[in-house]
Image: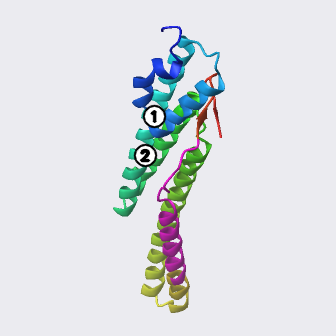
Amino acid sequence: MPENETLEETYRVEIANLSEEGREDVLDAIEANPALSADEAEALIDRTEAADKNREDFDALQKDQEQLMKDGEWETARDRAQEAEYEMREVEDLGGDADTEILEAETDVAEIDEAMDEHEASEQAADDAADFADRGMEGAAEVYGESAADHAANSADNAGAASPNEYNADHDVDGDGTYDA
Protein backbone atom coordinates (compact mmCIF):
# COMPACT_ATOMS: atom_id res chain seq x y z
CA MET A 1 0.00 0.00 0.00
CA PRO A 2 1.48 3.36 -0.98
CA GLU A 3 2.24 5.57 1.99
CA ASN A 4 -0.29 8.27 1.18
CA GLU A 5 -3.12 5.87 0.35
CA THR A 6 -5.71 5.29 3.08
CA LEU A 7 -7.07 1.84 3.96
CA GLU A 8 -10.40 2.94 2.49
CA GLU A 9 -8.69 3.73 -0.81
CA THR A 10 -6.59 0.57 -0.76
CA TYR A 11 -9.59 -1.70 -0.18
CA ARG A 12 -12.21 0.31 -2.11
CA VAL A 13 -13.06 -2.61 -4.43
CA GLU A 14 -13.43 -5.10 -1.58
CA ILE A 15 -15.48 -2.61 0.44
CA ALA A 16 -17.70 -1.85 -2.56
CA ASN A 17 -18.51 -5.55 -2.92
CA LEU A 18 -19.90 -5.76 0.63
CA SER A 19 -23.55 -5.34 1.54
CA GLU A 20 -24.66 -1.85 2.41
CA GLU A 21 -24.47 -2.72 6.11
CA GLY A 22 -21.09 -4.35 5.62
CA ARG A 23 -19.70 -1.29 3.83
CA GLU A 24 -20.92 1.00 6.59
CA ASP A 25 -19.49 -1.28 9.25
CA VAL A 26 -16.06 -1.53 7.65
CA LEU A 27 -15.85 2.19 6.92
CA ASP A 28 -16.92 3.02 10.48
CA ALA A 29 -14.32 0.59 11.85
CA ILE A 30 -11.57 2.05 9.70
CA GLU A 31 -12.55 5.56 10.76
CA ALA A 32 -12.73 4.55 14.42
CA ASN A 33 -9.36 2.79 14.28
CA PRO A 34 -6.95 4.93 12.26
CA ALA A 35 -4.03 2.77 13.35
CA LEU A 36 -5.59 -0.35 11.80
CA SER A 37 -2.95 -2.28 9.90
CA ALA A 38 -3.46 -3.64 6.38
CA ASP A 39 -3.60 -7.18 7.79
CA GLU A 40 -6.24 -6.15 10.34
CA ALA A 41 -8.25 -4.40 7.62
CA GLU A 42 -8.11 -7.51 5.41
CA ALA A 43 -9.25 -9.69 8.33
CA LEU A 44 -12.07 -7.23 9.04
CA ILE A 45 -13.20 -7.36 5.41
CA ASP A 46 -12.99 -11.16 5.36
CA ARG A 47 -15.13 -11.43 8.52
CA THR A 48 -17.62 -8.96 7.09
CA GLU A 49 -17.85 -10.89 3.80
CA ALA A 50 -18.49 -14.12 5.72
CA ALA A 51 -21.12 -12.41 7.90
CA ASP A 52 -22.80 -10.99 4.76
CA LYS A 53 -23.06 -14.52 3.34
CA ASN A 54 -24.60 -15.80 6.58
CA ARG A 55 -27.10 -12.93 6.55
CA GLU A 56 -28.06 -13.76 2.96
CA ASP A 57 -28.56 -17.39 3.97
CA PHE A 58 -30.65 -16.27 6.97
CA ASP A 59 -32.90 -14.18 4.74
CA ALA A 60 -33.35 -17.04 2.24
CA LEU A 61 -34.16 -19.50 5.02
CA GLN A 62 -36.74 -17.13 6.49
CA LYS A 63 -38.42 -16.70 3.10
CA ASP A 64 -38.51 -20.46 2.71
CA GLN A 65 -39.86 -20.83 6.25
CA GLU A 66 -42.64 -18.35 5.55
CA GLN A 67 -43.73 -20.19 2.41
CA LEU A 68 -43.60 -23.54 4.17
CA MET A 69 -45.82 -22.16 6.95
CA LYS A 70 -48.33 -21.00 4.34
CA ASP A 71 -48.20 -24.45 2.74
CA GLY A 72 -48.82 -26.16 6.10
CA GLU A 73 -45.39 -27.81 6.12
CA TRP A 74 -44.79 -26.90 9.74
CA GLU A 75 -42.09 -29.43 10.58
CA THR A 76 -39.99 -28.38 7.60
CA ALA A 77 -40.65 -24.72 8.41
CA ARG A 78 -39.39 -25.42 11.94
CA ASP A 79 -36.21 -26.87 10.46
CA ARG A 80 -35.73 -23.70 8.38
CA ALA A 81 -36.21 -21.50 11.45
CA GLN A 82 -33.62 -23.53 13.31
CA GLU A 83 -31.21 -23.31 10.35
CA ALA A 84 -31.76 -19.54 10.24
CA GLU A 85 -30.84 -19.36 13.91
CA TYR A 86 -27.60 -21.25 13.21
CA GLU A 87 -26.73 -18.84 10.38
CA MET A 88 -27.03 -15.89 12.73
CA ARG A 89 -25.03 -17.70 15.40
CA GLU A 90 -22.28 -17.89 12.78
CA VAL A 91 -22.55 -14.11 12.35
CA GLU A 92 -22.26 -13.81 16.12
CA ASP A 93 -19.20 -16.10 16.07
CA LEU A 94 -17.66 -13.78 13.49
CA GLY A 95 -18.11 -10.93 15.95
CA GLY A 96 -21.47 -9.75 14.69
CA ASP A 97 -24.44 -8.52 16.64
CA ALA A 98 -27.17 -10.98 15.78
CA ASP A 99 -29.16 -11.06 19.02
CA THR A 100 -32.37 -9.78 17.43
CA GLU A 101 -32.28 -12.29 14.59
CA ILE A 102 -31.34 -15.19 16.87
CA LEU A 103 -34.20 -14.34 19.21
CA GLU A 104 -36.57 -14.09 16.25
CA ALA A 105 -35.55 -17.52 14.96
CA GLU A 106 -35.72 -19.08 18.43
CA THR A 107 -39.18 -17.59 18.90
CA ASP A 108 -40.29 -18.92 15.51
CA VAL A 109 -39.15 -22.43 16.50
CA ALA A 110 -41.07 -22.21 19.79
CA GLU A 111 -44.20 -20.88 18.07
CA ILE A 112 -44.10 -23.61 15.44
CA ASP A 113 -43.65 -26.24 18.17
CA GLU A 114 -46.65 -24.80 20.00
CA ALA A 115 -48.70 -24.71 16.78
CA MET A 116 -47.94 -28.39 16.16
CA ASP A 117 -48.80 -29.30 19.77
CA GLU A 118 -52.08 -27.38 19.61
CA HIS A 119 -52.91 -29.00 16.27
CA GLU A 120 -52.32 -32.45 17.75
CA ALA A 121 -54.47 -31.57 20.78
CA SER A 122 -57.22 -30.34 18.44
CA GLU A 123 -57.21 -33.59 16.50
CA GLN A 124 -57.31 -35.62 19.71
CA ALA A 125 -60.20 -33.58 21.14
CA ALA A 126 -62.10 -33.91 17.84
CA ASP A 127 -61.61 -37.70 17.92
CA ASP A 128 -62.80 -37.76 21.54
CA ALA A 129 -65.85 -35.63 20.66
CA ALA A 130 -66.74 -38.05 17.87
CA ASP A 131 -66.36 -41.04 20.23
CA PHE A 132 -68.62 -39.43 22.83
CA ALA A 133 -71.18 -38.55 20.17
CA ASP A 134 -71.14 -42.16 18.91
CA ARG A 135 -71.93 -43.33 22.45
CA GLY A 136 -74.79 -40.86 22.81
CA MET A 137 -72.98 -38.63 25.27
CA GLU A 138 -73.92 -35.34 23.64
CA GLY A 139 -72.81 -33.11 26.53
CA ALA A 140 -69.31 -34.58 26.59
CA ALA A 141 -69.17 -34.49 22.80
CA GLU A 142 -70.02 -30.79 22.84
CA VAL A 143 -67.35 -30.01 25.46
CA TYR A 144 -64.70 -31.89 23.50
CA GLY A 145 -65.87 -30.30 20.26
CA GLU A 146 -65.42 -26.85 21.78
CA SER A 147 -62.02 -27.90 23.08
CA ALA A 148 -61.05 -29.06 19.59
CA ALA A 149 -62.10 -25.71 18.17
CA ASP A 150 -60.13 -23.82 20.83
CA HIS A 151 -57.00 -25.88 20.17
CA ALA A 152 -57.41 -25.37 16.41
CA ALA A 153 -57.70 -21.60 16.89
CA ASN A 154 -54.63 -21.59 19.15
CA SER A 155 -52.73 -23.64 16.58
CA ALA A 156 -53.60 -21.18 13.83
CA ASP A 157 -52.59 -18.23 16.02
CA ASN A 158 -49.22 -19.81 16.82
CA ALA A 159 -48.65 -20.73 13.19
CA GLY A 160 -49.38 -17.16 12.14
CA ALA A 161 -47.03 -15.81 14.79
CA ALA A 162 -44.26 -18.09 13.53
CA SER A 163 -43.97 -16.27 10.22
CA PRO A 164 -40.64 -14.50 10.10
CA ASN A 165 -40.66 -10.77 10.54
CA GLU A 166 -38.72 -8.46 8.29
CA TYR A 167 -35.47 -7.80 10.05
CA ASN A 168 -33.21 -4.81 10.02
CA ALA A 169 -29.76 -5.77 11.19
CA ASP A 170 -27.93 -3.24 13.29
CA HIS A 171 -24.34 -4.37 13.30
CA ASP A 172 -21.46 -1.97 13.56
CA VAL A 173 -18.00 -3.48 13.28
CA ASP A 174 -15.13 -2.43 15.46
CA GLY A 175 -11.59 -2.82 14.23
CA ASP A 176 -11.06 -5.60 16.77
CA GLY A 177 -13.59 -7.79 14.97
CA THR A 178 -16.53 -7.19 17.26
CA TYR A 179 -19.82 -5.65 16.36
CA ASP A 180 -21.64 -3.14 18.51
CA ALA A 181 -25.36 -2.48 18.53
- Compared to residue 140, the image places residue 64 above or below, namely above
Q: CA distance from mark 1 to mark 2?
A: 11 Å
Outermost residue on the left side: it is: 71
Question: Quick one: label 1, few (<14), some, or many (20+) residues within 10 Å?
Answer: some
Q: Residue at x 60, y 36 (%)?
A: 172
Q: Which residue is mark 1?
A: 52
Tell me, yes or no, whether the highlighted magenta stretch contains residue 167: yes
Can you give x and y, in whole percent of width and height, for residue 78 in the image?
A: 45, 51
User: Which amino acid does the dot numbered 2 rest on?
Assistant: Asp
- Compared to residue 112, the image places residue 100 above or below, namely above
- Please tell me in which quadrant of the rendered image residue 102 appears: top right
Tell me where the magenta segment starts and ends, as one range: 146-170
Image-based side of 9 in relation to 171, left or right:
left
Secondary structure found at label 2: helix
The answer to which of marks 1 and 2 sits earlier in the sequence is 1
Pair 1/2: label in front: 1
Question: Quick one: label 2, few (<14), some, or many (20+) residues within 10 Å?
Answer: some
Can you give x and y, in whole percent of width and height, for residue 135 in the image?
A: 46, 86
User: Which amino acid does the dot numbered 1 rest on?
Assistant: Asp
Can you give x and y, in whole percent of width and height, for residue 160 in the image?
A: 48, 66
Q: Residue at x 45, y 80 (%)?
A: 131
Q: Residue at x 53, y 33 (%)?
A: 91
- Compared to residue 1, the image places residue 49 above or below, namely below
Quadrant (top left, top right, bottom left, bottom right) of the C terminus: top right
Q: Name the foreground residue: 47 vs 135.
A: 47
Can you give x and y, in whole percent of width and height, for residue 146 in the image?
A: 53, 83
Secondary structure found at label 1: helix
Tell me, yes or no, whether the highlighted magenta stretch contains residue 76: no
Main secondary structure type of the part rendered in magenta? helix
Q: Which numbered marker is on residue 59?
A: 2
